[in-house]
Amino acid sequence: MSLAALKATAHAHPRRLRPAAPAGLVACALLAALAFLAALAVGAVSISPGRVLEILAGAFSTPADEAGAAMRERIVVLDIRLPRAVLGLLTGAGTAMAGAVMQGVFRNPLADPGLVGVAPGAALAAVSFFVLGAPLVALLPPLAQTLALPLCAFAGSLITTLLIARLSMREGAMSVATLLFSGLALGALASAGTGLLVFISSEQQSREFVFWTLGSLGGATWPKVALVAPFVGFLVVCAPVLARGLDALALGEAEAFHVGVPVERLKRLAIIAVAAGVGACVAAAGVIGFIGLVVPHLVRMWLGPGHRVLLPASALLGAAVLIAADICARIAVAPAELPLGVVTALVGAPFFLWLLLRRRMIG
């Protein structure tokens, strides 16, 4: 393909949106809004959607004549369910958008944020906290005690990702293949360290760590939301910058470079944004699988591969799916609560198998 043809293809590609793309984006936004409203209304104390909207409208004021059941509903919505729903919104959006970015960077629809070592690094830091650091936490102020585990997990994921990115650099360029192999190797090493620490831990420490790895929004608080929001926000802000370059990268790295895309800068920014977003999500909610893998697939099949639509639609649909999964986790075996990672795996794994069988039948 000539350079002129490449440039024409690269410039035309982002404009080839499917006719259903604008309506699809609106539909994803509506799904996310409905899931968010349902998360505030459904639970042990059932509250009507109209009452939820009334409470949200008066969130910054306390009616003088409100007491009894009305005040209880207000506390349930604003103090218990709202931070959980907001954390689910951020975690689902960040994980799904990170999956779409990784699949664009690797030009592989089966790529997952775990490839850059985020989850294994976070897990190693978390089990180190449970086994080695827990006695020191009692000496910290209350707010620091709440944030100690998320901060440790985030630091572990960030250090692992930066180490993998450093190993993949050669003569100033980042090799995607080396990045992949480094991620797999260091991920395996982190998993081995995690296994060793679990082996020497007490029964209580082991139980706490296993529960954390299964994922949950049960410990949602406003400090945790404040911890996650800037990093997911960074990923979301980077999306418009990444979209056009990822579309061009689909033609190949050399082709993207020849049409003016700064390939190395694009890959570095993508890896940093993914590490920040997913690291914060894993730190706050544990390891939640399949959202970053399955949701971009659904959006790509529905609205096409263009990243201008794929990235925001994945974020909105990922938020809707994760919040819906959290509602199922809360009500399926009430008053107990299923681990969130179990629910997403029960839904995501059959879909992934169906996708593989479908590709096999088509191919």
Image: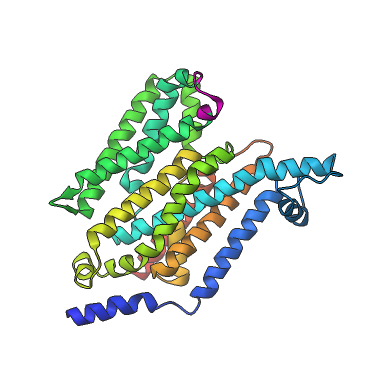
Tell me the quadrant of the picture where the N terminus can be found.
bottom left
Residue 343 vs residue 241, the one in the foreground: 241
Q: Position of residue 133 (x, y in %)?
A: 42, 22
Q: Position of residue 343 (x, y in %)?
A: 54, 46
Is residue 122 on the magenta stretch? Answer: no
Is residue 144 on the magenta stretch? Answer: yes
Which residue is at a point 62% across and 59% down the rendered structure image?
33
Residue lying at the far left of the rendered structure: 171
Up the image or down, 64 lies above or below 104; here it is above
Which residue is at a point 45% across and 39% down the rendered structure image?
283
Give the image quarter of residue 67.
top right
Residues shaded magenta: 138-145
Which residue is at a point 35% across and 62% down the rendered structure image?
242
- Work out whether residue 184 can be spotted: no
- Work out whether residue 85 can be spotted: yes
Q: Position of residue 99 (x, y in %)?
A: 40, 55
